[in-house]
Amino acid sequence: MPQFPSKEWLDEYALRINQSAAYREAAATWEGDVCYVFEPEPDRGVPREIWSWLDLWHGACRGARYDFPPEEGARAKFVIRAPYSRWKEVINKELNPVKGMMQGKLKLTGDMPTIVRHVRAAEELVNIAASVPTEFVDEPAS
């Protein structure tokens, strides 16, 4: 079971994005890469900032990268950042990411109206994330 956050988790997520007919349909007109930034929470097992990147294009994930320099990630069309515990809430479907962005719980760099126009695609990305068997770094292994 992949640990979150990790390259293994991101790779499984990208694979599941490409296997999802629901995402392919919901994101048919989506164009743009996205960086998810996991802000450090040392007391929860995330000692430093970690950047991950997805090349999302018309319902497919054309590439995924994990743990690279922020100056590379900052070039993405959308950058969404939050502490690790917020991302955990998103994956556990306790926080809707679009509402979280509007409430300032997730910080967006990029065009918010574009995100809102593609809310179904965002919801499918959360459904896919929730489907990945996940071991969180701050929870004991089961």
Image (cartoon, grey):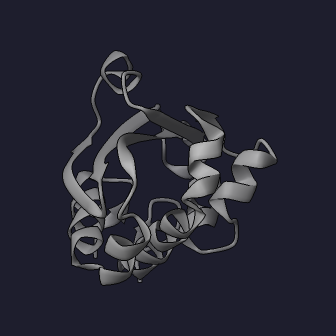
Residue 53's spot in the image, x, y percent?
32, 42
Of residues 27 and 85, the one nearer the viewer is: 27
Q: Residue at x 57, y 45 (%)?
A: 114
Quadrant of the image containing the N terminus: bottom left
| Rendering quarter of residue 132 | bottom left
Q: Is residue 84 left or right of residue 140?
A: right
Residue 23's spot in the image, x, y percent?
38, 73
Q: Is residue 65 left or right of residue 75?
A: left
In this rendering, the answer to whether 120 lies above or below 64 is: below
Residue 67's spot in the image, x, y percent?
29, 36
Marker count (numbered): 0
Q: Tell which residue pokes out farthest to the right in this image.
A: 103
Of residues 78 and 57, the one nearer the viewer is: 57
In this rendering, the answer to whether 65 lies above or below 18 is: above
Q: Residue at x 81, y 47 (%)?
A: 103
Q: Residue at x 68, y 65 (%)?
A: 96
